[in-house]
Structures are given as structure tokens and as C-alpha cells.
Amino acid sequence: MKKLRNVLVVGLVLLSGRFATGEESAFASLPASASAVQPAVAPPARSSARLASLVTLEESLTPEGASYSGMARAAAASPQAAGATERVRITLHGRVVDEDGLPVTEVQVKLHMVGTPTISTGTDDAGNFSVANLEPGEYLLRAEKPGFFVLENQKIQLTADSSSFTFTINHQQEVREKVDVVASENRVETANTAQSDALTAKDIIDIPVPSSHDLQQSLVAMPEILKDNSDLLHVAGARNTQAQYLLDGFEIGDPISGQLDARLSVDAVRTAQVQTGRFGAEYMHPGAAVLSFDTPEGDDRWRFATTDFIPGINVQQGVQFGNYYPRLSVSGPIERGKLWFSESFSVQHTLSVIKGLPSGENETTQWSGDSLSRVLWKVAPNHSLHGSVLYNQTSDSYLGLDVLHPQTTTYDYTAHRVFGSLKDQIYWEKTLFEFGVGADSETNLFTPQGTAPYVLLVNGAEGNYFQRIHQDGKRYQLFADAIRTSVHWHGVHTLSAGANLSSIELTQSAVRGEIQALRADNTLDRVTTFAGPAQFHGSNTMAGLFVQDSWTPNRYFIIQAGARMDWDRLLQAAIAEPRVSLNFLPFKDNRGKFSIGWGIYDVPLNLSVIGQTQDQQQVDTLYDATGTIPVSGPATSRFVMPAGGLQQPYFDIASAGWQQRFGTNTIVSMELLARDEHHGLVYETVTPGQIGSEFLLQTSRRDKYRGVTVSARRQFSNGTELFGSYTRSRASTDQVLDPLLGALYFAPQQPGPLSWDAPNRFLSWGSIPTPIWGILFSYFLEYRTGYPFSAVNQQQFLVGEANSLRFPSYASLTVGFEKRFRFKGYVFAARLAVVNVFDRLNSDTVVNNVDAPNYLTFYEGQGRAITGRLRFLGRK
């Protein structure tokens, strides 16, 4: 019996050895970089440990570069435990930096050994990546990110003594010669959970938008962004004051209103990125979206470029100085390897001639200039200081001039703005520490052409504009955060936490005159005057804290969870904002990604809206049919604060999306977005239907946005790039009206579409190198539903439902032809563009007064035009 038992034991041991060898043979059939060991017969006593090691090592080889588990590391480190014939396994630790030695996030890294499959991973917020379970030997590495030149076929020799490497990728600069430059592949951003889109510097330069010198015009090449008929930006259907605008990590939105009015040279932007959903807890009071700009800081190479340095000539009314948009950029070292600078400067002079007005009274001139100066000091390999100064100066004459408003009714606008920032970055022990401080100051002055009464006609205006306004706005901001990368616990974590503090101030003074409203027969219908103090000062302070974890539990999932707490001094209250998002990666080659997320995002109180409660009162008097006898009034209207205070406005945003790569150069995506506003600021009429009312400030407005966007982007081997998107959306609100002094609506609030609602929008652009004289053909095509508007009568009462009428649909095609050439040893690029090729009406002005004989007459917007651009690129 004892002998039989011994025979059974020996048999089981031998059998287990055969099964272990069989598992090894199965893994041995895989390529070397995916298998854990070479096929070999091991002593039976160690077979179970080796089998466990094989499974663990196979699971650890993920695109995210998860490190060995405890069992795998023990097996690799102990020949006695794993078998003397096993090969050594190594973990590659890498870091990707730019030409200035600064970490680059979200870089796709591909690693390949001859005869093995390609391994993909990505860098974290500190530029780090790691890949576990690699055999020693020579590998080829490829690193790429949009906006950077591709690092291709970088050889590394991986050994037990050499497993840590740093790789440098350079920001894209224009290539002056015809050389072989590897194009970046269209790829799925596996680590990015946000619903986002971006334009690189190349996109901004190549896409022939109607006014290519204006950065804001270029932004409409992203399907999430459009401009209304007043040239104001709206991101994903939100109000232009409800997004957060960032310049190199600092808030750059107008401290008075919150809208984007800072000017940047087109050449100063490396990347413009918009995020409309699933963005993280690090963003303080972002509202509906985040629009951020990344700008250059210089490197060890001197760079110089200029554009449109030859003034334009206008011959519409004799020969005169016309449009002139010179831009200059220069960067280089102050001390090589340590201290760099960059300067981007532009001037914009626009001469507009308005059709339908008498000669000599149909011109408006706009001057503006901007300068962005940046300095980078690399104090130590792990320590850098970043400083920047942005200056804007603007002077516009006859602002508001159109066929219905002659020069006398317009106003001149002058403004200047100075923004400065300093950011300190320290990388220590896998943790990135950031400290930033910024200051912003601006002055705006609106000056009418005279002091005569402002006369409202049924189809326009005459006299002089009724108000002169002087505004001073300031913002101070401070933030600190820390990002800890490569924390291993049930996967890989990136942990971050931080705090922010900011304050804003608004000082305003005004001088307002009389407004007279005339009927069609020129009899007096209404007189409006203003009473009370016209100066006020307002301020607010906001503070916030956040924590966040980006967790990669395995190769299939990336989960980002975070929370913020923001406090507002005006409200004397705080709001909690949880935010969570998830990526699901169903394919091993990362060609597809499903994303979903939800979060709460607060909106700061708008001082320009609240300030109306401290401004003047409006006094209205109505007259009989003869225009001589008052029949109602004088009646006083005022804006008032509620006795019970206000609540914190915020959005809750839910989004989901699918992104799919086809081949190596085509990306197709679909994004769904649902955004709901809570406690939005709005003025409600206490006694609607009559002149003279209190407009009570409330936090009761609810804006809603629902949208689905389908887009595709394709790159071809010859350099051709094509993009197309279709967006079906609805932007609506339960309280449409926004009364202002001089433009009060004596009607109850009512629901309707927002004034920039565009249910259907198709967008396409591209650039195509042609064999004809080396000309680069480019185009920009936009079609959308016409914007809604309301009808009113001469007494400023709403007629019909708010925003129940619409402009005709908008469609415009712009094409460009660019040729590079050499002249006296220098390289130039000349582009000729035709704007609105089909010369569509594309109305942006309408007579909405029902008492006007030409009610619902639409007036032409941008007609067909030919523009030119000449760029100096340097020596050949």
C-alpha cells in the first residue's frame, strides 16, 4: 500500500511537470517580448510558481506600462524560484521632455524589437512612462504627440544596468526646405478622458478662415465653437461669459464680464484646446467649458518670422491705406541651455467700407496691437521658472456702424490691458509641484460722437449714442498644486491636489443722455432719461481646493475621479463639485475608446451683471399719437438685489463618446453632450407689461444644451489632411430676456432658444499639396442654421414669442492657394484666398421692429472678397 502511494505521488509530480511544460510551450509560441520565459523543462517542485509567474507577467504587459506584481518580480529576481534557464526581465523607465527639458504629457510611445509585436504606452502628467517585462536587447522607439515633430526609430540598448532613458521631442516649427519629416499619426488619446478637441499651430496657419489674422476666427474651425452675429464666441452652445479661458494655465477671460476679449498673435499659439465635458477637478469655476492656449517660450535656436509686413491698399473710394495685419515673432537663447525668451507681436488695422451709406460717411477704422513676451529659466534640471507679459491696445472708430446706424449714432472704443504671470515648477521624487501667481488690469472707454439725443427710428437710429462708459477691471490669481505620478496599488495611479485663490474688481462710471423713440410718421412715441448715481465699484473673492485620482487598474480601463470645493465671498457659501469619468479600451492595439463622465462645474458671479443693481435708474414717458401729450409716465425702472441673497450658479454636465481609428491615419468619433444650468443669473420683471418696473436679480435661470457631434479626420501620405464634422444640437433657456439700461424688455421672462442656437452645423476644412507649381490648396467650409431673434415694437415691448424668428441659413466657402518661393536667399510663402466664394448674402443684421415699413429686411454680411498673405520664413 505504501509503495502504491509512492508510485501515485511520483506519477502526479511527473504529470504536473508535463502540464507546466505544456503551458510554457503555449507561451513560447508567442513572440519573445510577450512571453515570460523560453520553453524549458523545470523541476516539478517549481512548476506551480512558474505557472503563476507566467500568468502574472502576461497580465503586467499592458499599454499603460504597469510594473511587475510582487510574484512576477520575485520570479524574475530569483533564478532558484523561476528556473536557471529563464531570461532576465527588465522594466524600462522613460521620460519624454521637449527641447527645453520640460516634461511632455500624453505622448504616445511605441516600443518595438525585431520579431516582436509593438508595445504602446503613454506619458503621465510628469512626462514619465514605464514598460515592464522586457527582454534585454536593442529596441526601436517612436514618440509622438500632435503639435510636436515625431521622434522616429530611436534606438535604445536595454540592459539590466541601463534601463532608464530620457527622450526629447521638439515642438513643430515650419519646415523651410523640402525634407523628410515623419507625419504624426491620427491616434486615439487613450489616457485622456475629457471630451476635447484641439488645433495645432499648423492647423491655425493652414486653414483659410475668412480673417486668418484673427485668432478667434481660427477657433471656429473646431465644431464645438461658433461665433454669433455680434462676433462673440460660444463654446458648445454656452454664453460667451460661461467658459474658462486659459493662457498657459492662467485665467485670461475678461475680469469684468468673463468673455474672451484678450488678443493674441496667431503665430503665438502652439495649441488651442477646447474641453466641453469630462474635464478634471483641477479647473476652478470652468462653467460650461475650458478653452486653453499654449504658447512658446524659446529654445537654444534663434528663430525669426514675420507675416503681412507689406501694407494693404484700399481702392474702393480712391487710393488709401487699407487693411494691414503685420505679425512678428522672434525667440532664442539669453543663455544657452539655461535661459530663453520669445516675443510675439502683431498689429491689426482694418478699414471697413459699409455698403448703402453715403461716401465719406461709410468707413470705420479699427486699430489694435498685442505683444506676448515669455521667459523660461531652467534653474536646475528639475526646476524651472516661467514668466509672461501680455499687452493689448485697441482703438476703434465708429463702432457699430452699419446701414441702419450712421456714423453719428456710433461710438469710439479705446482699451488697454496688461496681464502678467509667473509660474514655478519643481519635479522631485516623481512629484511635480507648481506655484503660480498672475495679475490682470484693463481699462475700457466707450465714447459717443456727441451729446445730442439718441433717436430711435423704426428702421435704425440717428443723433448721438446715449451713453459714455468708463470701466476699470482687475484680477489677481494664485494657485498651487502637486501631481504624484506612477503610484502602484491595484494598478497605476496619478494623484493630484491643489488650491487656488483669486479676486476680481470692477469700477465703472457713466454719463447717459436722452433717448427719443419716433414712430414711422416721425411723431414722438417715447422719451427715456436716466437718474441717480452713475458710478459704482464691485469686487469678489473666490477660493477653492481639489483632489483627484487618475487610476489605470488594467489595460481596459482608465478612471478619473475627483472633487472640488469652491467658496465665493459674495455668496458667503461653498459648493461641492464631484467629477468622474471613465475610458474603456476594448482593443489591445488601442484603436477604439469609449468614454463616459459626469460632473458639477461652478460658474463665478458676473460683476458686470450684478453691477447693474448699483447703476442708474431708467425713466420712461409715453406720448399720444400727436407726440406732444404724455399718456403714461414718467415711470422709473431699476435693477434690484433680492432680499434673501443669491445661490451659486453651476452646471451639471454628462457626456459620452466613442472614438475609433481606422488604419493608421483616419479617426472617426461621435460625442454626446447634455448640459444643464442651475441657479443662473437673470433679471425678472416684477410688473411685466407696463413701463416702469423693478427688475429683480435672481438665480433661477436654467440654460440647457443637448448636442451630438460626428467627425472624421484623415491624413494622407502626401501630406493631404481632411476634416469634416456634423453637429445636431439645441441650446435653449427658460428665461430668454437680458434687459440692460437703455434696452429694457417690459415683458415677462419666457423660454426659447438662445440667440446663438444653431440646430444643424456642418464644418469641413483641409489642405492638399498639388503637383501644380508646388501650390498648397486649402479650404474652409461652414454651413449652419440661421440664428434666432425676437420682434419688438417701438415702445420696446416684445411682439410674439422670444427668439421665435430666425435669420436665413449661413453657408460660406473660403479657398486658399499658397506658394513657397525663394528670393535672394530667403524663403517666403504667399497665399491668395477667396472668401465666400459663392457670394451668399449671409445676413447678420435685420429690421426686427414690427412698426417699421421694412420689417424683416435682412442686410448682407461678409460678401465675396479676395485676401492675401505673405509670410517671411527665414533663410533657406
Image (cartoon, helix red, strand yellow):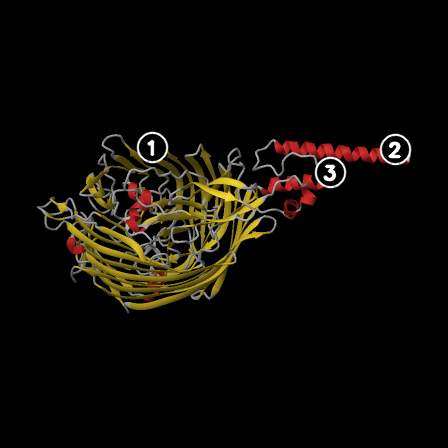
State the residue position of label 2: 4
Q: How crowded is mark 1: few (under 14 residues within 10 Å), some or many (20 or more)?
A: few
Give the quadrant of residue 604: bottom left
User: Is there any visible trace of residue 580 in the rendered image?
Assistant: yes
Q: Which residue is drawn at 38% across and 38% down?
A: 182
User: Is there any visible trace of residue 859 in the rendered image?
Assistant: no
Q: Which dot, 3 or 2, sits closer to the camera?
A: 3
State the residue position of label 3: 43
Q: Which dot, 2 or 1, sits closer to the camera?
A: 2
Secondary structure beneath dot 3 equals: loop
Q: Identify which amino acid the numbered label 2 is placed on.
A: Leu
Residue 540 position within the rendered picture, expressed as x and y whole percent measured from the top left? 39, 66
How far apart are labels 3 and 2 at the CA level? Answer: 22 Å
Q: How crowded is mark 2: few (under 14 residues within 10 Å), some or many (20 or more)?
A: few
Q: Compare residues 132 and 277 and report the one nearer the observer.
A: 132
Q: Identify which amino acid the numbered label 3 is placed on.
A: Pro
Residue 640 position within the rendered picture, expressed as x and y whole percent measured from the top left? 37, 64
**Left or right of residue 601, residue 37 in this image:** right
Secondary structure beneath dot 2 equals: helix
Secondary structure beneath dot 1 equals: loop
Q: Are marks 1 and 3 in contact (CB under 8 Å)?
A: no
Residue 469 position within the rendered picture, expressed as x and y whole percent measured from the top left? 25, 63
Q: Sequence order check: which comes first, mark 3 or mark 2?
A: 2
Q: Compare residues 45 and 733 and report the one nearer the observer.
A: 45
**Left or right of residue 728, residue 37 in this image:** right
How far apart are labels 2 and 1 at the CA level? Answer: 76 Å
Q: Identify which amino acid the numbered label 1 is placed on.
A: Asn
Q: Residue at x 39, y 39 (%)?
A: 184
How far apart are labels 1 and 3 at the CA level? Answer: 58 Å
State the residue position of label 1: 718
